[in-house]
Image: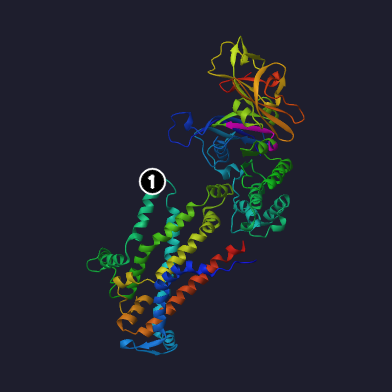
Amino acid sequence: MNKTINQRAWLFVIPVFILVAFNAVVPLMTVVNYAFQETFANNVFTWEGTRWFKQILRSDRFHAALGRQFMFTGVILLIQIPLGIAIALSMPKKGIGVPICLVLMSMPLLIPWNVVGAMWNIFALPEIGFLGHSLNDLGFDYNFTQQIGDAWFTTILMDVWHWTSLVVLLSYAGLQSIQPAYYQAAEIDGASKWAIFRYIELPKMKKVLTIAILLRFMDSFMIYTEPFVLTGGGPGNATAFLSIDLVKMALGQFDLGPAAAMSLIYFFIVLLVCWVFYNLMMRNEEQK
Amino acid sequence: MSKITLKNLSHSYLEKQNSNVDWALRNINIDWRDGGAYALLGPSGCGKTTLLNIVSGLLNPTKGKVLFDNEDITLKTPVERNIAQIFQFPVIYDTMTVYDNLAFPLKNRGMQENEIDARVKEIAEMLELTKILNNRASGLTADGKQKISLGRGLARSDVNVIMFDEPLTVIDPHLKWVLRSKLKELHQKINRTMIYVTHDQTEALTFADQVVVMHEGEIVQTGTPVELFEKPKHTFVGYFIGSPGMNILSCEIQNGIAAVDGVKISTSSTIKQKSNFSKIEIGIRPEFVSFSKEGIPVKIIKVSNTGRHKIIDTECKNGKIKVLSRSSKEIPSGSAFLSFDKKYTYAYGDSRIIE
C-alpha cells in the first residue's frame, strides 16, 4: 500500500498533546522527579536512584498498609458484588416500582465522599450516634473510635452503603437487556431458577459485571476521603489504607522522596491488577 | 402427541377492554389434528405470536380454553404441557457446548445419563451438528444457533407440539431455503404436530398442510394453500396471499347482479337484492383476468415484465385492476377491455365472501 506522507497531520494532534501534557504527564513527571531524588529547601535536588523504591518495598509500614488495602478491597468486593446482583435480581422489571427503586438506589451515589464520611461518623458515634448508641443499648460493646474490629466494621458498612448501588444499577441494566425469549425458552426447557441464573443471567451480565468489579476495585483501592473523615486511619493505624498512609508520609512527615516512590508503586499496582483482571475476563470473548 | 383445540379464545393485554381494538385476539376457535403441519400467517401485530404463546402456556388467555386431547390445560405451565417452542431469535445457552445445549431440556427432566447421550447424538445427526458437538455454542453463526434451538425443541421425544415463532427471520436468504426444507423433512420423519408462525406467505404455504390466516386478532380463513389461493373468504386473504394480491373493486348491485362501471359481472356468489352490507366489493385474482373484445373498459397504465409473466396495471372507473399474463402474450396498449373468469370471481359483503 502506498500511503501519502503528510506530516502536517501532526498539527491536529497538538491540542490534545498539550491538554494531556498539562493534566497528566507534567504532574506525573513531578512525582517521578521526586521519586528518584532527595530534596531540601530552595529546590536543591540530589540524585538518589532507586533508593526510595527499595526503602518502600522493604518497609513494614508499606507492607502493612498494602495488606490492609487488599483486605479492605477484597472484603467490600465479596460483599458488594453478590449483594448488588441479588438486589438487582429482586428489583421489579416494570411498573411504577422501577423508577422508585432506581431513584432510591441512586441516592447514596449522589452524596459527596466527605459528607458520607461525616454522616457515618456522627451516625456511629457510641455516645450520640443512632447506630452507635443503639448497638450499645442492645448490649454490644461498640466503639469505632477505640476498637479495631468496630472501626473496620463501620468502614466496610459505610462503603457497602455508599457503593453497592453502583453494582445494582449496572447489574440491573445487564438484566434488563436480556431478551424475554431467553426466559421463555428456559421455562419451556424446564430450567430451575438457579439454572436460569447460572446459564442465562450470569453469562449475559458478564460484561457489566466486569465493569462493575473494575470500577469497584479501583475506587476502593484508592479510597481516601471516607475513612479519613470517619476514622482518620485509626485507631492507631488500623484503618490507614494506602492513600491515607501516603498522605501521612507526604504531607505529615514531608518525606517527599519515599512518598513519590510509594505513589508510583501504588499506581502500578492498580494498573497491573486492572490489566490482569480485564484480560482474564475478556480472554474468552476474543476466542469467538 | 395430541390433538389441540382452542375454544372461544380471546386475549387482551389491557386490564379493561372498551372496544374491539383493545383485544389482541378475538374469539378464536381452532382444531388442530395430531401430527399435522400448520401455519399461522398474518402481518406483524395481527396476534399470531400471542396465539402461539397461549398455546405454549407462556401467556394465560383472558377468555376461553386451550385443550390438549380434550383435556383442559388452559392454566397449566409450559413444562406441564410438555411442548417445545423455537423463537424468532436463536436462544442458546452461551456458556455451554452444543452438546450441553441439546442435553439441557433432558437433564432438567431428570433423564438417565446414557439415554441423554443417545438422544443428543441422534438429534445432532439429524441436524448435521455432530462435528461441532463439543464446540462452544456462542461461537456459531446465526443459522447454526437456530439449529441448536431447533435441536433443543426436538430433543424430547414425547412433546405434544413443536411451535415455531418466525424462526427464519435472522437467517440468510440462501440458508432459509435449506432450513425450511430441513423442517419439512423433519416433520415427515418424526410426524409430530408442528405450528409455524410467520408473516411470509411462501414459508407458510410451503411448510403447512393447513394455513390459518389471521387479521387484526381474528382468524379470517383456515384452509389448504390451494383453497386460500382459489377461494379467499376474506378480502384480506385475497390481498395478503398471492403476488400481486387480489383485485378488490367496489361495485353496484343491479337486480342481484354485480356491476362495475355499468358492466355486469357474473360471479360465483349468489347476491340477494336486499342485503344489509354497508359495502359490497368484487374480488378477482390477477391470474384470472384477461383482455377481451368486450367487458370493463380500462386504461393501461404500466406493464412490468418479471421474466416469467407480465404484470399489467390498469385503471377503470371503480379502481385499479392488475392483470397477470404470460410474458409471451401481446398486450394491447392505451385502452382495452377486461373480462373476469366467473369461477374465480367472488362478491364480498363487508369484506367477507358472499357464498
Judged from this view, the residue extending furthest toward the left is A128
Specify whether B11 is left or right of B235: left
Residue at screen point 57% across, 48% down: A185
The extreme top residue here reads: B255
Q: State the image coordinates of residue B301 (x, y, percent, origin top left).
A: 64, 27
Q: Nearer the viewer, residue A154 or B160?
A: A154
Residue highlighted by disc 1: A96
Residue B211 part of the magenta-drawn span: yes
A49 w.r.t. B174: above or below: below
Q: Is residue B105 left or right of residue A31?
A: right
Q: Is residue A72 above or below residue B133?
A: below
B16 or A15, which is in the foreground?
A: A15
**Residue at the (37%, 56%) spot, across then down:** A105
For residue A63, say whether it is visible.
no
Q: Is residue A169 magenta?
A: no
Q: Which quarter of the rendered picture does the C terminus of chain B lie within?
A: top right
Circle 1 chain: A
Task: Locate residue B117, reporting x and y percent.
Answer: 69, 56
Q: Position of residue A39 (x, y in %)?
A: 35, 87
Which span is picked out in magenta?
B206-214
The quadrant in which residue B35 appears is top right
Residue at the (32%, 61%) spot, across then down: A111
Using the image as rendered, state which of residue B18 and residue B304 is in the foreground: B304
Apparent side of residue B110 relative to residue A39 in the rendered image (left or right): right
Task: Tell me, yes or no, if residue A4 can be seen here.
Answer: yes
Disc 1 marks a residue whose amino acid type is: Ile
Q: Counting other residues with Cα less than 10 Å from the Cα at mark 1, is it few (<14), some (14-19), or many (20 or more)?
A: few
